[in-house]
C-alpha cells in the first residue's frame, strides 16, 4: 500500500512539474548600460514592449562615461546606449575594446544661444561667444559658428577643428567647460550649449539664434553598442535585434518630443546597423543574407 502511495505521489509530482514547466514563459534578460536617469524614461516604452515578448530589459545606471564601455567589454552588461560614434571609437581604440554599433538612437543638437541678441546678425564685431573646451564638442561648435557665418576654418583642419584652425573670426571665442556654459550665458554675448545642459537649465530649443547644422553627421549620432563577441551568438543577436526595434518606435519619439523639448532628435532608425555589423564579420545568418543581398 505504502509503495503504491509513493508511486502515485511521484507520478503526481512529475505531472505537476511538467505542466508548470510548460506553462512558464521563458524570460530572457538583457542588461543595458546608460548614463543618466533620463534614459530610464526614454527606454520605458521599449522595456514595456519587450516585457510582452518575455524579454526582461534591465536598465543599468552608470555615473560616468568610462565605466559603461568597460562593463560591456567585460560582459557585465549586454548592451549600452549613452555615447556617439566619436566617443565609442576613441574609447575603444585607447582601451583596446572590440565594441560594435548595432543601432542608432538620437542626436542632441548643439545650438547657439544668447540672452542679449535675437539673431546672429545682431552680434557685433568682437562679441564674446563661449564654446565647449573639449575636443569633440569644441570642434563641432566651431563648425556651427562657421555655418552661422561668424568664423572661417582652415579647410585642412579635419573632422574636429581646434581654435588654431580659425582663419578669420567676427567674434571673440571663449572656451569654457561645457557644463558651466549655461550659467555663464548672461556674461557673454552668445554661447554654444550642449543640448543636455541646455535642457537641465530650462533653455528652450526654439530660443536658439542659430540651430545646429550637423544633425545628418553620423559621427554625432548616439547609438546602441554590443560586444563583438556577443554577435557570434545567434540567440543574443535575435534578442538584440528585438531591443533595437523596440526602441525605434513612435512611442519613443513621442517621449523625445513631449518630455524633452526637441533636444532628442531621432536619427538613423531606417538603417539596419546590426545586419551591417554581421555582414562585416561574416556572421550574418543565411535568412538575412537573402534579404540584404549578401
Image (tube, rainbow, N blue to C red):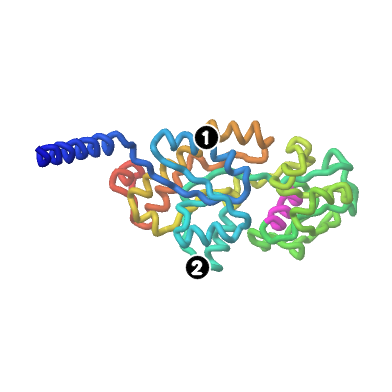
**Which segment is the magenta one?**
137-147
Other-residue count near label 2 (Cα within 10 Å), few / some / many at <14 / 14–19 / ≥20: few
**Image-based side of 218 in relation to 116, left or right:** left
Dot 2 corresponds to which residue?
96
Residue 89: numbered disc = none
Furthest residue to the front?
Answer: 1
**Image-based side of 221 in relation to 287, left or right:** right
Residue depicted at 65% across the width and 31% down the height: 258
Mark 1 and mark 2 lie on one chain; the one further toward the N terminus is 1
Q: Which sits in the foreground, 191 or 168?
A: 191
Q: Which sits in the foreground, 166 or 184?
A: 184
Does 144 appear in magenta? yes
Residue depicted at 53% across the width and 50% down the height: 60
Q: Are marks 1 and 2 in contact (CB under 8 Å)?
A: no
Horizontal and vertical percent position of residue 12: 19, 36
Residue depicted at 79% across the width and 59% down the height: 175
Horizontal and vertical percent position of residue 106: 58, 43
Other-residue count near label 1 (Cα within 10 Å), few / some / many at <14 / 14–19 / ≥20: many
Dot 1 corresponds to which residue?
45
Name the chief secondary structure element in magenta. Answer: helix
- The quarter in which the N terminus is drawn is top left
Horizontal and vertical percent position of residue 78: 45, 52
Local secondary structure at mark 1: helix
Q: Which sits in the foreground, 10 or 233?
A: 10
Does 158 appear in magenta? no
Q: Which sits in the foreground, 69 or 272?
A: 69
Local secondary structure at mark 2: loop
**Image-based side of 132 in relation to 222, left or right:** right
Q: Quadrant of residue 205?
A: top right
Real-space Cα separation, disc 1 to disc 2, in angstroms: 34 Å
Vertical comparison of 153 with 13: above or below = below
Amino acid at each position: 500500500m505504502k509503495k503504491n502511495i509513493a508511486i502515485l505521489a511521484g507520478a503526481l509530482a512529475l505531472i505537476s512539474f511538467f505542466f508548470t514547466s510548460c506553462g512558464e514563459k521563458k524570460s530572457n534578460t538583457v542588461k543595458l548600460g546608460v548614463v543618466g536617469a533620463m534614459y530610464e524614461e526614454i527606454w520605458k516604452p521599449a522595456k514595456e514592449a519587450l516585457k510582452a515578448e518575455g524579454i526582461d530589459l534591465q536598465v543599468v545606471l552608470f555615473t560616468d562615461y568610462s565605466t559603461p564601455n568597460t562593463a560591456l567589454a567585460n560582459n557585465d552588461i549586454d548592451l549600452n546606449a549613452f555615447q556617439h560614434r566619436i566617443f565609442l571609437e576613441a574609447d575603444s581604440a585607447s582601451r583596446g575594446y572590440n565594441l560594435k554599433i548595432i543601432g542608432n538612437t538620437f542626436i542632441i543638437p548643439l545650438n547657439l544661444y544668447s540672452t542679449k541678441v535675437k539673431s546672429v546678425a545682431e552680434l557685433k564685431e568682437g562679441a564674446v561667444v563661449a564654446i565647449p573646451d573639449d575636443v569633440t564638442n569644441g570642434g563641432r561648435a566651431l563648425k556651427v559658428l562657421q555655418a552661422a557665418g561668424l568664423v572661417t576654418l582652415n579647410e585642412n583642419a579635419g573632422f574636429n577643428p581646434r581654435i588654431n584652425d580659425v582663419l578669420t573670426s567676427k567674434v571673440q571665442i571663449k572656451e569654457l567647460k561645457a557644463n558651466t556654459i549655461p550659467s555663464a550665458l548672461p556674461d557673454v554675448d552668445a554661447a554654444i550649449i550642449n543640448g543636455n545642459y541646455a535642457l537641465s537649465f530650462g533653455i528652450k530649443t526654439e530660443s536658439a539664434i542659430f540651430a545646429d547644422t550637423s544633425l545628418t553627421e553620423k559621427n554625432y549620432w548616439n547609438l546602441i553598442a554590443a560586444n563583438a563577441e556577443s554577435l557570434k551568438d545567434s540567440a543574443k543577436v535575435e534578442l538584440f535585434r528585438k531591443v533595437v526595434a523596440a526602441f525605434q518606435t513612435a512611442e519613443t519619439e513621442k517621449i523625445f518630443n513631449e518630455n524633452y523639448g526637441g533636444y532628442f532628435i531621432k536619427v538613423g532608425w531606417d538603417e539596419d546597423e546590426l545586419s551591417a555589423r554581421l555582414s562585416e564579420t561574416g556572421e550574418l545568418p543565411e535568412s538575412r543574407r537573402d534579404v540584404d543581398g549578401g
